[in-house]
Amino acid sequence: MHPDRLIRPGQPLDFPEGLLCGVDEAGRGPIAGPVTAAAVILYPDCIIPGLDDSKKLSAVARDALEGHIKARALAWSTACASVAEIDALNILQATLLAMRRAVEALTALPAVVAVDGLYSPRLSATTIAVVKGDARVAAISAASILAKTERDRLMTALGREYPQYQFERHKGYPTALHLERLREHGASPHHRLSFAPVSATRCA
């Protein structure tokens, strides 16, 4: 959970030599659906124009960049932690679990894993947490985009399976529309029962 090193805003980006893997997640804030993580290793000389924190990009831009990342990365992978794991472990631990799964699914072994935020999963590689890393480290930016596009696809598929919630519109976030549908229909099997809006609805 605690990285080998933490790089805060304003501190220089200084990574040990060796293959660098960027890791980020999508879906900590929603009240439904899994949390998704991605791990990306870029070639040292690989430059993909437009890489940025996925939250700053439009859906069209993310989708376009996803194809470039997957085509040009040395290795990439995505992984999830389920709603049941989120409820059992808490969202932070489930996020770290998804991150570890993503790193362990890579076809190349990284020497250093740079993770967006303050915490990192336990790994055999050196772990470095980079605050606001999704806007500072290309591999983390790439991972943030893959995590977001993968999760959006999963939530769109859930929207087709459970049309009454319109997951494809809000992706599980607690928007006014989502909360209205939650009150009307109750919780689905994909709602996070440990999250307050859902648990309050179940107790009503």
Image (cartoon, rainbow, N blue to C red):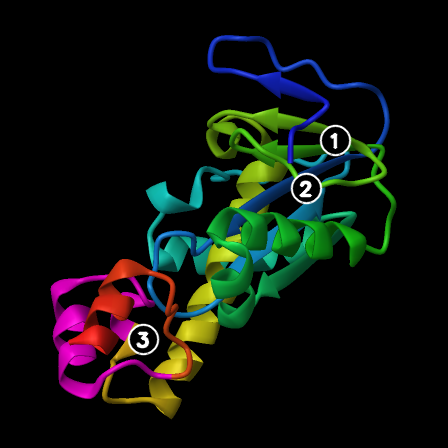
Task: Give the overall secondary structure of the magenta segment.
Answer: helix
Q: Nearer the viewer, residue 65 or 143?
A: 143
User: Which stretch appears magenta?
Assistant: 169-188
Q: Which mark is residue 45?
A: 1
Residue visible at 62% across and 15% down?
Answer: 13
Residue visible at 77% across and 38% down?
Answer: 43
Q: Position of residue 172 (x, y in %)?
A: 32, 67
Which of marks 1 and 2 precedes in the sequence?
A: 1
Q: Amino acid at mark 1?
A: Asp
The residue that label 2 is drawn on is: 121
**Disc 3 versus disc 2: nearer the observer:** 2
Q: Position of residue 151 (x, y in %)?
A: 48, 65
Q: Nearer the viewer, residue 72 or 186?
A: 186
The residue that label 3 is drawn on is: 168
**Disc 2 versus disc 1: nearer the observer:** 2
Q: Position of residue 176 (x, y in %)?
A: 12, 65
Q: Quadrant of the N terminus?
A: top right
**C-alpha span from label 2 to label 1:** 27 Å
